[in-house]
Image (cartoon, rainbow, N blue to C red):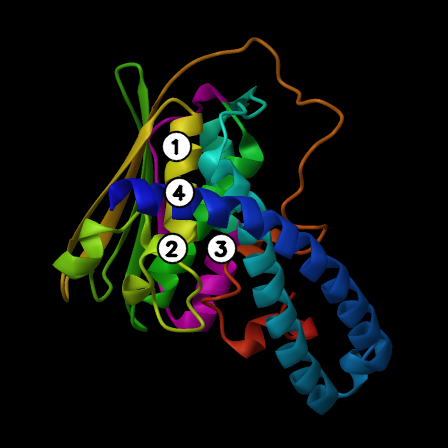
Amino acid sequence: MENYERKEAQLLASLFPSIAAQLRGMLSGLYLAATALAPAEAREKDPELDRRASRLDQNYYQLLRLVNCLSAAARLDTQTPLPMQDCDLVGLVRETCDEAEQLAQFLKLELTFNCALPQLICSANPDSIRQLLFQLLSNAFKFTPPGGTVMVALKRQDDQALLEVADTGCGIDDLQMKALFDRYTHAELRDPPPHGLGLGLPLCLRIAEDHGGRMMAESQLDVGSRFMVRFPIRHVNHSSLSDSKFDYTGGFNRALLGLADALPTEAFSIYNR
């Protein structure tokens, strides 16, 4: 049975990118048509048009986020190393939290970033770290009720970097915890729409492993959840990636894209960008 599930996971991982490539082309055409029907100038002058167009934008961002997850699914079954560069993790995480904090207000959530370090230079792939952090924040935003708190922390423990995302949300039951990082192969454990295919956490785990690290989770019902990513502090002695950078945002607002599944429609209003 375990071997069968492994082959099924490999098949899914190989199919997802091909499906994503076809969907991406269709989405581009839909977005261009929607932009022509409701240009920014018209939306600024007409609040009702902006409200309707915001719903279109919300759906587009959610679909693009799903397509990006499908594209990235190939990494679940590949040994190709991520391109790394020396970067400041403190600045990277703080910048991502600052972008997300503005959107947390739409959900009446408090987002805090705790870090006593002025700087932490480490070999990493910045796009992947952002993707991981936005995924964990999106989960926390979705399952934390208004008035709750989401906390991000970054610290150094000896030669390890420890990134934590904790929330005061509904928590995760024992059944879900058992397959938390491979739910996309367990249909009965996936969150109901619009919460995705269960690819987010497996991709986060792979990103952690690509950085030579590991990922852990703990949760208590009606109290909250905590996700911890730990990886070694290494250096590659250069600070720029190759010219062929991978931009998983497609040029769109990366915070809106990363948190699209968790945000209300008004977050996509042209007045709130």
Left or right, residue 40 beside residue 164: right
The stretch in magenta equals 99-123
- Residue ID at (63%, 46%): 248
- Disc 1 vs disc 4: which is toward the camera? 4
Give the label on residue 184, or none. Answer: 2
Relative height, residue 3 to residue 267 (above, below): above
Tell me the mark number nearer the camera, choosing from 2 and 1.
Answer: 2
C-alpha span from label 2 to label 3: 26 Å
Q: Name the spot of residue 193 as percent of width and height, x first.
A: 42, 73
Residue highlighted by disc 3: 100
Residue 268 lies within the magenta run: no
Q: Which residue is mark 4?
A: 7
Q: Confirm or deny contact between disc 1 and disc 4 (CB under 8 A).
A: no
Q: Residue furthest bottom?
A: 48
Q: Nearer the viewer, mark 2 or mark 3?
A: 2
Q: Amino acid at mark 3?
A: Ala
Q: How far is the residue under mark 3 from the one under mark 4?
A: 37 Å
Q: Amino acid at mark 4?
A: Lys
Q: Earlier in the sequence, mark 3 or mark 4?
A: 4
In the image, 152 versus 197, the foreground residue is: 197
Q: Amino acid at mark 2?
A: Tyr
Query: How far apart, in angstroms, are the residues tagged by discs 2 and 4?
Result: 13 Å
Identify whether 96 is placed above or below 32: above
In the figure, 58 relative to 90: above or below? below
